[in-house]
Image: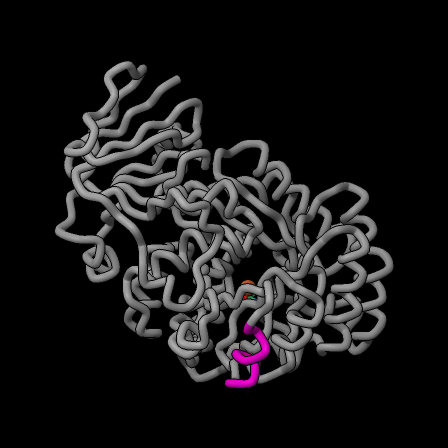
Amino acid sequence: MKLLIKNIAILAGIDTGGTLKKCGEEMAHFDAINDAWLLVEDGIITEFDTTADRPAPTDVDTEVDAQGGAVMPCWCDSHTHIVYAGSREQEFVDKINGLSYAEIAKRGGGILNSADRLHALTEQELYEQAMERVREVIAKGTGAIEIKSGYGLNTQDELKMLRVIARMQESTRLRIVSTFLGAHAVGREYAGRQGEYVDLVVNEMIPAVAAEGLANFVDVFCDQGFFTPEETARILEAGAKYGMRGKIHGQELAPSGGVEVAVKHQALSVDHLESMADDDIAMLRGTDTMPTALPGTSFFLNMPFAPARKMIAAGLPMTIASDYNPGSTPSGDMKFVVSLACIKMRLQPAEAFNAATINGAAAMGLSTDYGSIAPGKVANFFITKPIPSLDFIPYAYTTPLIARTFLAGIEQYIRLW
Ligand code: NIG
Ligand code: FE
């Protein structure tokens, strides 16, 4: 099956050099050509060019007219918690009234509130709620996503979450990777017995998750008031025994040693970084651990933003992701995340696009197949309405410019309501 996309005013995020991630100054280059076409065969990108250099092929099965819009690789959202039950708008109001995220968590709200709600739902109900969010993010241009467990907090409910993710992997063309986050908070039954809860994660949960092959990665909320770097190290070592690499929540609420433990255990990514120090940046240089900023979380919690400019100046690669979850950022809108990265972290649009595509794919271990418009990669792309330039995308920060999403070369027709 040959699919041609023609009349593309700007074909962006292209690559013919096998780039798997962009670091430092490379992030300023989001390569694009004008007046172009794109050829897809059986769901894989095969060729592209400008019409001036080479007319579009005619021996195709289907033609799609981009009508002068831009075509870009789908967003690769490397950090989400979109399998959750219900919502937590009461805590949103509590925050407006002056309570902090940490204070809400301390009095038993927050993650534990979501765990109670999740416990009460069947797998089917949880699946349906999560799939509604999946449909929304696909419509907004996301093509690959990481989803974490972490609202179970006991073995059965953690497995329930991960089984829901496995079912989602089967039933959508969105590329999904899964992460076991049993150490997101101490489960209610273990209140005051954090050490025993960590034992449970290490001795029972991780082996059970591995036995069913339910997780690609392991995560720990390594932060003040949650898990210590020592506990995080134990959990990372336990995951590594089963081939699960780390993707750590670190340095969100305080400078809490998250970067150091992530680097020491060769985690694939260390995420949040709102409280990152210059030492942490130095520590990440020359490592394979991808720093990931979550600007939507900083925005929603009214907290500092990760020091993105410093990371790029130090030559680091950098990813941005949505962190879509019910407590700290109930949104998976990656276009808005790109705008926030530009407005609040001072990224150039090109840097933000790279952070949200190729580097996002790298932070999920997927960049050989996703994250750019490159021959041989899966044809996950979106078409925008006609726009004056790529910079217009983050500039028009609430305009729904993403008109059509294709996953593995197949258009996704989504009715949201
Ligand atoms: O990434 N920081 C820890 N976990 C989530 C929030 C989870 C929640 O509040 O439900 C986050 O922000
Ligand atoms: Fe998170």
Q: Is residue 406 above or below residue 184?
A: above
Queried whether the magenta region covers residue 284, the answer comes back as yes
Left or right, 222 with respect to 30, comes to right
Left or right, 106 with respect to 69, comes to right
Closer to the camera in the image, 104 or 386: 386
- Residue 55 position within the rendered picture, expressed as x and y whole percent measured from the top left: 19, 26
Query: Count the marks: how many?
Result: 0
Rendered residue at 44%/22% (across/down)? 42
Closer to the camera in the image, 81 or 354: 354
Closer to the camera in the image, 337 or 62: 62
> Quadrant of the image for the N terminus?
top left
Closer to the camera in the image, 120 or 43: 43
Task: Write the start and end of the magenta stretch as one range.
Answer: 278-285
Left or right, 51 with respect to 29, comes to left
Rendered residue at 40%/71% (across/down)? 300
Q: In this view, does 376 lie above or below 185?
A: above
- Residue 286 position within the rendered picture, expressed as x and y whole percent measured from the top left: 57, 70
- Residue 258 position within the rendered picture, expressed as x and y whole percent measured from the top left: 63, 76
